[in-house]
Image (tube, rainbow, N blue to C red):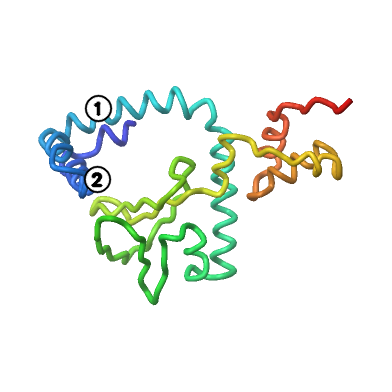
Amino acid sequence: MDALLAAPTDQTYAELVDATKGRGADMGRRLLDDPDRARSEAAVALRRLWKAAVEPEWPSKRQALRAEMLDRAIQVNREGLRAFLPRLHPSAVCGGDTIDVEKSVDIDVDCPEGLILVPSLFITDRMQCTTSDHWAPAIYYPASGRYLWAAPATPRSLDRLLGETRSRILAALTTPLQTTVVARLVSALPRRPANT
């Protein structure tokens, strides 16, 4: 929040211009007429959202994101970006030295300093691109660990075959996770009533 509130007005304005492209003239006017007010309102809203919805769950989510980044780094190292990128989301295509992300707004961005790939637990259906002159270009993609918002169910047949605890662990490992995250996830699942 401190970094958001300390952002210079010209940077805030430039990012609001990016954010309002294709969103309608009324929204653009409301935000761009007073970028300082828009920044302050955004900070208040984000702080409230963080306190109410994210902060209580953040320790396990942060560990899931760390596991995601490690797993993706290994995949890129093994297979290269060209093979890896389309698996992040079908809207991404890598051809030659160009990465195309299918979006409703056409923006071309050079990445002389590189491109940042950011997993997100909040974006589940698309890729989001950051193209502001004030930030390094970044692509936000749906993290494979996003299922952690709700623990995965395990089939009863798997419970019978492996036992309930082992089947829960196996279901949790659909994405690479640290053992402490798996332990927390498995212990948080409600026990199934025994068949009589």
User: Where does label 1 land, which residue?
Assistant: 41
Asked if 41 appears above or below 101 in the picture, the reply is: above
Identify the residue at image location x=48%, y=64%.
86
> What is the tally of numbered marks visible in this picture?
2
- How far, Cα to Cα, is label 1 from label 2? 15 Å
Q: Which residue is mark 2?
A: 19
Amino acid type at image mark 1: Glu
* Apparent side of residue 128 relative to residue 67 in the rendered image (left or right): left
Q: Is residue 113 left or right of residue 33?
A: right
**What residue do we see at 71% from left, 44% from top?**
171
Task: Look at 31% across and 66% down and name the residue there.
Answer: 112
* Quadrant in the rendering for residue 99: bottom left
Instruction: Identify whether 164 is placed above or below 47.
Output: below
Location of residue 63 in the rendering, given as x and y in whole percent from the top left corner: 58, 40
| Of pointers 1 and 2, the one earlier in the residue sequence | 2
Question: Furthest residue to the right?
Answer: 196
